[in-house]
Image (spheres, rainbow, N blue to C red):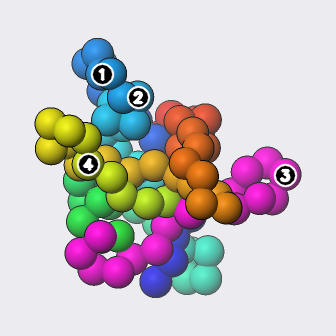
Amino acid sequence: MSVRITCINKDAGNHDNPHEAISFLGWINENTKQSGKVSRIEMYDWIREKGGEAYVRGEDGTVSLVGTAITNRGTKYVRTYANGVWNDNLLSLPEC
């Protein structure tokens, strides 16, 4: 199953890495129209452990895949990349 991330919620904490500040992600399956909202850790686990696929579609139609990463301190998070380059497309999404 593949889902498009449509929005994010950030917590109020200070983080060296802005992707760690994402606490929740809203999503939609564009085939079934099913939608929901999950925590950053749930999305991380779904992608990493269960083989799920997520992406962000830019206003110009470009697609950036959502990948998983872990900080040096062991914090799990998700962020987007396109053409093998990490980018900040998740952070440009509206609040849920």
Are the residues flagged by discs 3 and 4 in contact, CB closer than 8 Å? no
Q: Which residue is mark 4?
A: 70
Q: What residue does disc 2 label?
A: 18
Magenta run includes residue 53? yes
Mark closer to the chain start, 3 or 2: 2
Tell me the mark number nearer the camera, choosing from 4 and 2.
Answer: 4
Labelled pair 1, 2 in contact (Cβ < 8 Å): yes
81 or 92: nearer the eye? 81
**Residue range (magenta):** 48-65
Q: Amino acid at mark 3?
A: Asp
Question: Which residue is disc 1 drawn over?
Answer: 15
The span from disc 3 to disc 2 (Cα, nearest Å) is 24 Å
Q: Quadrant of residue 9?
A: top left
Amino acid type of the residue tagged 4 in the rendering: Ile
Q: Position of residue 30 (x, y in %)?
A: 61, 74
Which marked residue is nearer to the observer: mark 1 or mark 3?
1
> In the image, which is nearer the foreground, mark 4 or mark 1?
4
**Is 13 displayed left or right of 61 in the figure?**
left
Q: At numbered mark 4, what does the secondary structure look like: helix, strand or loop?
A: strand
Q: CA distance from mark 4 to mark 1?
A: 14 Å
